[in-house]
Amino acid sequence: MEITIIGAGYVGLVTGACFAEMGHIVTCLDIDEEKIKMLNESHIPIYEPSLEELVKKNQKGKRLFFTTDYKKAIKNATVCFISVPTPSNEDGSCNTSFIEDVAKTIGSLIDDYKVVVTKSTAEVGTTFKVKNIILEELKKRDVRVDFDVVSNPEFLKEGTAVSDCLKPDRIVIGTENDKSTEIMKEVYQGFTLKHDRLIFMDILSSEMTKYAANAMLATRISFMNEIANICEKVGANINNIRKGIGSDSRIGYSFLYAGIGYGGSCFPKDIKALCSLAQRKGVKASLLEKVDEINTNQKKVLANNIIEFFSKNGGIKDKTIAIWGLSFKPDTDDMREAPSLTFIEMLLNKGAKLRLFDPIAMQKAKKLFKEHKNIVWCRDE
């Protein structure tokens, strides 16, 4: 099957490479000409384990292509995945303007049946918004073209995204009719040979499932961080607590590690978006608001502890502190919402001298802090 991925960012590139690996003919489209030039030269603009090898393999096998040409990308595709950024608005709500722009372009170009799939994480109702925009564009052209819309949220984890995509624990798909359902089964046929991981549902539930999953995981992290803070005051060991509760089959061990807060492109943005959606619908999302508040405060806890320690030992000014690990999690170069950013800023504001290192994210981190007289960028030697 010929598939187009619109948006060659983190999700789009991984998804496109994995679809190609399963035998589909995939074209990844992006309006960023420099990015597409790099990809056509087999240079990967992001770091993700195994991704570079997968891209090169499928480019060589003539199953994976990159372009900036919408018309060329869409023309022969049966399925078009929308995988563009959905940044936060100032009020925390999800900005779907990039998705809407893509929908307008699709509506202005299609001349035969397509399945248009929203892969980007977006507010509940976005897929139907895409449908209405395409219909409006077709109306402007005074043409009738059959198409279907589908919701298919991504559940990739940075650092293990390729294996997550090739061997998913579930594939959530929201459809409106049997025709699009059967086409999506064909799209994912290679991913379900050993186990049927497809979960079909209505479109609105599919969109909400993504938010609910991330909200649940973020809640577990904030819960454990709050318990860890209590443990520190009463002398209990949070690692022992984790073992004690994780062994309960109703709870399990996943996402029970205390730390300095969650970051990345998903949890912070999605929690705020869900809180914003709830507020606009007249629902008080008290728990989720608290999850976000706990996480914001948790990013300051370690820095405050260090500052307090040195306040009793001559102050932190001009003290040298080494920080190993800058990205929001291991095995990625993603610095978005990384807890280290808050940590570093707080220590610099107090006059500390920092020696920073990350095995993967150094270049992106340097762009964020540029030149600072109190920062030394270290090498692995």
Image: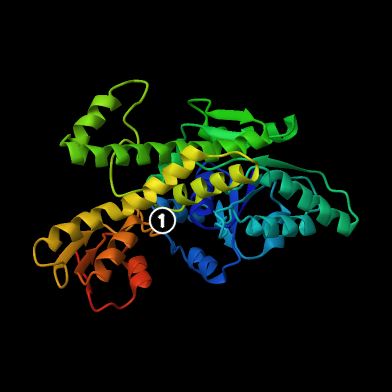
Depth order, front residue of 218/276: 276
In the image, is residue 377 above or below residue 338? below
Q: Position of residue 103 (x, y in %)?
A: 71, 55
The colour scheme applied to this rendered structure is: rainbow
> Percent from the top left, x then y, of residue 291?
42, 42
Residue found 75% across the figure and 47% down from its top: 131
Task: Identify the image quadrant of residue 88.
Answer: bottom right
Quadrant in the picture for the N terminus: top right
Looking at the rendered structure, the number of numbered marks drawn on it comes to 1
Looking at the image, which is closer to me, 89 or 116?
89
Q: Within the image, what quadrant is residue 141 found in? A: bottom right
Can residue 270 be seen at all in this image of the molecule? Answer: yes
Note whether 255 is above or below 314 in the view shown. Answer: above
Picture coordinates of residue 224 (x, y %)? 31, 37
Q: Is residue 43 above or below residue 297?
A: below
Q: Is residue 145 left or right of residue 160?
A: right
Q: Residue furthest right?
A: 142
Could you tell me the amino acid type at mark 1? Glu
Q: Is residue 174 visible?
A: no
| Residue 121 horizontal side relative to residue 305, left or right | right
The C terminus appears in which quarter of the rendering?
A: bottom left
- The residue at 58%/57% (across/down) is 7
The picture places residue 63, in percent across and down from the top left corner, at 55, 51
Taking the image as shown, residue 262 lies to the left or right of residue 126, namely left
**Residue located at (43% from left, 40% from top):** 164
Foreground residue, 183 or 86?
Answer: 86
**Residue where numbered disc 1 is placed:** 52
Label 1 Cα neighbours within 10 Å, binned few <14 / some 14-19 / many ≥20: some
Name, please, the residue furthest toward the top: 249
Q: Secondary structure at mark 1?
A: helix
